[in-house]
Image (cartoon, rainbow, N blue to C red):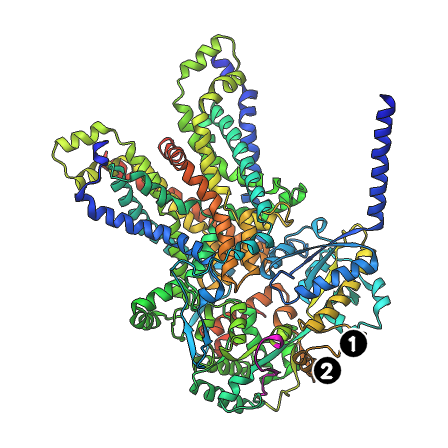
Amino acid sequence: MKRTLSYKLNIFLFLLPALILFVGILIAPIIMSAFYSFHEFNLVANTDMEYVGLENYKILFSSMLTNANTGKIYANSMYLGDALTHSLILAALSTFIQLPLALIIALKLSKGIWGERAYLSIYFMPVLISTVIIGRLWMNIYDPGPAGLLNAGLRALGIDKWLFPAISNAITSSKLPFTGQWTGFRETALIAAFIPILWQYVGYHMLLMYAGIKGVPADLLEAAQLDGCKEGQVNRYIIIPYIKPILKVCVIFAVTGSLKSFDLIYALMKDTSRAELPSTLMYKLLFLHNRYGLGSTVAVVLIVLCFLFAVLISFAFRDKGAKVA
Amino acid sequence: MKKLVALILAAVMLLGITSAFAEAEKPTLTLWSIATESDANRPAYEAAIPAVEEALGVKIVMEAFENDSYKTKIKSTSAEELPDIFFTWSGAFCGDFVAANKVYCLDEEFKNYAEQLPEVMLQNSTYDGKHYAVPLTMNIVTLFANMDLLKEAGYDAVPTTYEDLIACCDALVAKGIIPFGCSGNATWCVTEYLEPIIEKTIGYEAMNEIFAGRATWNDPAIAKAVDTFQEMITKGYFDPDGLSLDNDTVKANFIAGKYAFYQNGSWNCGEINDAEGDFQAALFPVMDAEKATYGQVIGGPNDALAVSAASKDPALAAKVAFALGKEICHYGYLAGSGLPAWTPDYDTSAVKPLVADVAKMVSESEGMVLFGDNAMSADPANIYLSYVAKVYGCEIDGAGFIEALTNELQ
Amino acid sequence: MIEARKFKLSNLVVHLLLIILVIINLFPLYWMITFSLKTNDEILGYSYKNEAGERILVPPNHVGLPNHWEWANYVEAMNTGNMGQYFINSLAVSASVIAITILASFMATYALTRLVWKGRKMMNKFFMLGLTIPIHAAIVPVFTILSKLKLLNTYAALIFPYAAFALSMGILISVGFMGDIPYDLDEAAFLDGCGVWRIFALIIAPLMMPAVATVGIYTFLQCWNELLFATIFVSSGRYRTLPVGVQQLFGQYTTRWGPIGAALTIATLPTIIVYIFLSKRIQDSFIAGAVKG
């Protein structure tokens, strides 16, 4: 039997469909992107590839301009740093607000609360709605005109009277007053874009964690209860360590998901520059600037970062897991 | 049995032949445009297509895309996938397609139309002395004014000097009327304000030199123009909501009487003319009389039709493109969605008053600058736009604007 | 556990918080449906002059039900875009992607877990790289590859890239499921004279049926809403998918809220309705994926 099972041709044939897809559409493009990132070319005008060395990386990371009059330093229009910072903020919000919220809900629901299934179904629902639709829906919620739901709500409650001036003061990127243009300023646009992203995927993470908690062996929980553990203690010392592998997956998805986030911002804002993320900057460089080399460089940076974070998170979880065990 | 089969076969063949004939009689051409349902040019396309189908015995199948997504779509379409005829912006945008040999040269067909189509209108789609696109309409930046609101502030005419305009704005603000509306969601709308202000400060020759890359942005006069624009914004002359409104909403607000002025392309003439209320068209006043005059305008023929080099019958597609261009221009002019790039050979007495006013400005114009984002190629144009967006949000001042552009667009 | 499900007073606060979350989740949908049935006047508010010549302001109706149910919005949204076609395209693409992903990942998983060879652990890790690679980052090379293969503007232009990007997740889940199938079965079949292909087709594949639903759901979530590839790789309306179609439609009605709302609702409801009927199965399969993966 062993001989048949290790028959080389069979192994190869079983792997073939997956390998063709994976290598042809994932691995080859990564290598090609890396190659493109040292070149500049215009795919529309069919120009030849011009070798530019590390120039693309320099443009994305180092070229800062100084205003001679004010001495203020600001980034060039293709600077990737801001977009990366934005996506890291999103990753942090996702990890420290979205995931804990999902975990709290999952812990409550998995204890067999009345209406458990109904709650689960409703919380998971936004995951199934197209991001384009969610983007457009939230664009209408943020509308500064008379129909905008958010401003109408704030005005009805009288919150706008102190909230809007407070936001005006907090905005440092612009001198203009804030009067409810949520997508009009750098700072507010970023928050406005993050809220629907976080909103949409709470249910996704919640269901993953819920699944993990349901998998905790009942005798483990009973033993803890017999020992007189309170609910909080059971959660902390039994359940959370047990579902660590799933928490790891959630954190990896949340962080890499934040780095690759694109659809929602693209659907929410016509001009993405106020809430630029690496993927929207890449889109702009490719399809507006026609700079295919520079755009590919952003792609390479993204791939490397996603990979790096995945490894780092796995490492962090492995370390702590060992201590608990 | 055999007979029956033969009969059926014969019938099928006959059917095939007749349908083949029908196809030969009526070749089908595909057309991509940005004339979506809400586009000002839609009626012109809807009138022109049947007219050309009738005249040339062809069938034209149009697919319309939304403006912004069209830019991406057309760029990422390979040569073979391009439709027979496609809408393009003239200038550098079309130039990329020409460079990639995706566009059929129209010189041969142009000979038949040289008398109706002034050579100057093809200037922006001519590369290496060859013509590659059929111009449709031409447009200029127009200052639209709601005269009912101006009257409330004590003005009977649109101010023609800068000092007067500022006084008018102050009077409007005192009456609780917002002077200007401008969308910050689409940066090209901001250029509709910024470019005339810069042009009225430095003059059209200097601006053309900069857009063509022969001069740098490093001109303190431009910084001053930008600062003036920002002063108008910070003084509350612009609707603060505009920062996150799209252009259609801003235009609807203007038509509904929310703003006294709206500065945008002349393709809006028809729509504004037909709206309820008293509207007039004017130009932005001169800011530096030594360098600029009132008659200088921003604009030019910027939309056009190109023929795909991979078309099955490019000669026919070229013929159809010219016929379409002429008809779209014709109906567009009458509907007020653009000024004619083609010399009218039809009754123009039905042209709407607002359109006629703007057409007069163009015919009397003392100099012209093409829209910045059309004049520059994709990369510099988008760098320029990214700083224009920062200007509207008051994130950089005039000095920062010229310094950044000088550094990035060497 | 069953008695614990009864409503308990002590859980009141918990329920209150959970219900607030329910409202946060459902309110945008409710709002979308109500404004899809309103006129612009009702959404934006309007003013009119009464008989005495006074200007009366009617404030916008934000959260209430429509005063007048404007079904014409739906007629307009349906007539403008080719939503039915886009919906079918999306279904066709998603179904093909799911089929290909399942087949390819089951086969690969069989080789990775049941066949004996050096380097299979490495190969598994290699496939797991795909979990973190952002789909958008591959756009230019995939575009060039598709264009060289003359596959742009076909269903295949979306199906193969989506399947490739769903593969890692598919393998991850399948490994969990296939590990639960007892090895005795293989051995018994082998002794009966079955080769690996027959074992895979007749024994393993039928037992992997629960995994089909799970891999299917994860794959569906990845490809149903994808926007960027769908925008770039397909230009013809014939193959356009729902997200792109919806995005196009928005460009046409920037100021008319009613038809926008109608388009949003039309694009959302089919998925939601299917979900309501199958929510338990969908959740169970999703949960199974989390546990096995």
Dividing the picture into quarters, in which one does residue A138 lie? bottom left
Residue B251 in sight here: yes
* Secondary structure of the residue carrying numbered label 2: helix
Query: Residue B371: x and y, percent?
Result: 63, 73
**Residue type for callout 2:** Ser
Quarter of the picture containing the C terminus of chain A is top left
Dividing the picture into quarters, in which one does residue A150 lie? bottom left
In the rendered image of this protein, does residue B376 appear above or below residue B4? below
**Residue type for callout 1:** Asp
Q: Farthest residue toward the front?
A: C51
In the rendered image of this protein, does residue A37 appear above or below residue B44? above
Residue A53 in sight here: no
- What is the number of the mark on residue C28? none
Q: Which residue is found at the position 16% from the left and 44% from the top?
A: C10
Looking at marks 2 and 1 on the same chain, the residue that comes earlier in the sequence is marked by: 1
Residue interval drawn in magenta? B273-286
Q: Farthest residue toward the left?
A: A228
Whether residue B274 appears in magenta in the rendering, the answer is yes
A257 with respect to A282 (left or right)? left
* Secondary structure of the residue carrying numbered label 1: loop
Query: Residue A176: x and y, percent?
Result: 41, 75
Q: Which residue is found at the position 57% from the left and 42% from the top?
A: C88
- What is the number of the mark on residue B363? 2
